[in-house]
Amino acid sequence: MARRYLAFLPAVAAAIIASALYALAPAPRHGTLQGFQTAPTAAQALKLRTDLAAAMHTAATSLPVPSGGSAGGSLASWSLGGGFFTDGVVLITASGTTTLTGPVGLYGGLVSTGKEYLLGKLNAGNDVALTSSAGYAERVSGVGAFDYLAIGGVSGTITPSGGQNVTVTASPIQY
């Protein structure tokens, strides 16, 4: 009978060794789509990659509801070592003092469908106030699944007050 139990000893020992090696191995790197990024620690600073900015609107005098890829910043430059950034910051600046009245929507677009999808409302759906020296920024998550981003009205075209020009870009965040 003892011989029967001894026959399982090599298999048990191998399982214990494999379990110990797995516990000592570094944690796998993962993310929603990026695959190569890990969550930041408190000691790590976030870096805004403005060198990879996607221009959505340059000196625009209106922000219409996006339709069929009419206005969008391509996320093609957001690739990183075989993966993609999924988080970013939307930056809105103006040539002078202005307000974007009404909910300003962030849309993700897919070339394959030719459609934009409302991801959310910037500034929690409130008006966005801008000056020539103070813009607006909001962190966005999960946008790497789309081919491009677009900004526009949710219920209709948004026209900046005072006839000011508005520039909108999105830059990825590197952890």
Image: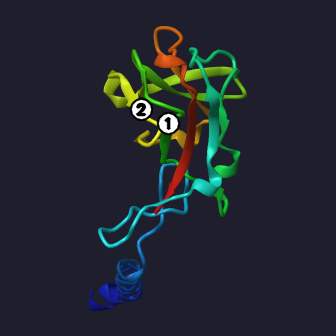
**Mark 1 neighbour density, 10 Å: few (under 14) some (14–19) many (20 or more):** many
* Along the line of sight, the residue nearer the viewer: 118 or 33: 118
Mark pair 2, 1: CA separation: 8 Å
Picture mark count: 2
**Mark 2 neighbour density, 10 Å: few (under 14) some (14–19) many (20 or more):** many
Coordinates of residue 153 in the picture (x, y in percent): 49, 16
Report whether 58 appears left or right of 95.
right
* Along the line of sight, the residue nearer the viewer: 17 or 96: 96
Read off the residue under disc 1. Answer: 92
Disc 2 marks a residue whose amino acid type is Leu
> Residue 165 occupies which quadrant of the picture?
top right
Disc 1 marks a residue whose amino acid type is Ile
Coordinates of residue 51 in the picture (x, y in percent): 63, 57
Disc on the earlier residue, 2 or 1: 1
- Residue at figure coordinates x 54%, y 18% from the top left: 163
- Of all residues shown, which one is farthest toward the left? 2
| Residues at discs 2 and 1 in contact (Cβ within 8 Å) | yes
Q: Nearer the viewer, mark 2 or mark 1?
A: 2
Q: Height in image: 85 above or below 15?
A: above
Callout 2 secondary element: strand
Q: Height in image: 91 above or below 61?
A: below
Coordinates of residue 126 in the picture (x, y in percent): 32, 22
- Residue at figure coordinates x 52%, y 39% from the top left: 143
* Along the line of sight, the residue nearer the viewer: 96 or 100: 96
Coordinates of residue 114 in the picture (x, y in percent): 70, 21
> Residue 67 occupies which quadrant of the picture?
top right
- Of all residues shown, which one is farthest toward the top? 156
Read off the residue under disc 2. Answer: 130
- Residue at figure coordinates x 60%, y 20% from the top left: 61
